[in-house]
Amino acid sequence: PPVVEGEAASAPSAATMAIEADIKALQQERKELAAAGPRDQHFSQGALLAFMGTAIAIEGCLNTYSRAGKLFPGPHLYAGAGLVVLWGLAVSTVPAMQKGNDTARIVHIGANVSTLGLFAWQVTTGIPILLKVIEKTSWP
């Protein structure tokens, strides 16, 4: 309750003191977590994944074209292209997220969750391709 002029301020209640202690403990925990640099680690790992994934996607197409003289449109190629597009979308949201834009954060998370599904599709469609390449390759 507000203190009326001329009245003595009452001491904080036990419940208020407990809440303030919890807040201080949570603030300390937040400082410790921030000091560990998880945002920087996440950014570095995400940048490496986006770079390596894009490079491998391009290399896969170049390798196929150099061996066969054409690309084979199908689920594997489409999943790979989708992955690269979603990685680009996720990366493009970073500046807005750094400014506190919650919509950008939701799009970033959604794009990255979607890449998990596309990656699973990429792997399952890639195994038969790999086995076919191994079968048709003449080994020394």
Image (cartoon, rainbow, N blue to C red):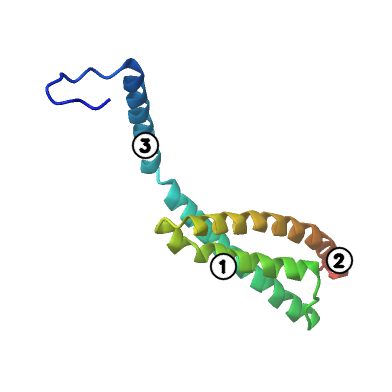
Quarter-of-image position of residue 95: bottom left
Task: From the viewer's perspective, tell me whether residue 95 is left or right of residue 68.
Answer: left
Report crowding for label 1: few under 14, some 14 to 19, many 20 or more residues within 10 A (C-alpha). some
Q: Residue visible at 13% across and 26% down?
A: 5
Q: Which mark is residue 88?
A: 1
Give the x, y percent position of residue 90.
55, 62
Q: Which mark is residue 135?
A: none
Query: Could you say whether the residue bearing mark 2 is in a helix, strand or loop?
Result: helix
Q: Nearer the viewer, residue 120 or 113?
A: 113
Give the x, y percent position of residue 10.
22, 18
Give the x, y percent position of residue 26.
38, 32
What amino acid is found at the position of numbered circle 2 in the picture?
A: Lys
Quick one: label 2 or label 3, which is nearer the N terminus?
3
Query: Could you say whether the residue bearing mark 3 is in a helix, strand or loop?
Result: helix
Query: Could you say whether the residue bearing mark 1 is in a helix, strand or loop?
Result: helix
Q: Which mark is residue 32?
A: 3
Quick one: label 1 or label 3, which is nearer the N terminus?
3
| Residue 90 sits above or below residue 62 on the image | above
Residue pointed to by mark 2: 132
What amino acid is found at the position of numbered circle 3 in the picture?
A: Glu
Give the x, y percent position of residue 136.
87, 70
Task: From the viewer's perspective, tell me whether residue 107 is left or right of residue 12.
Answer: right
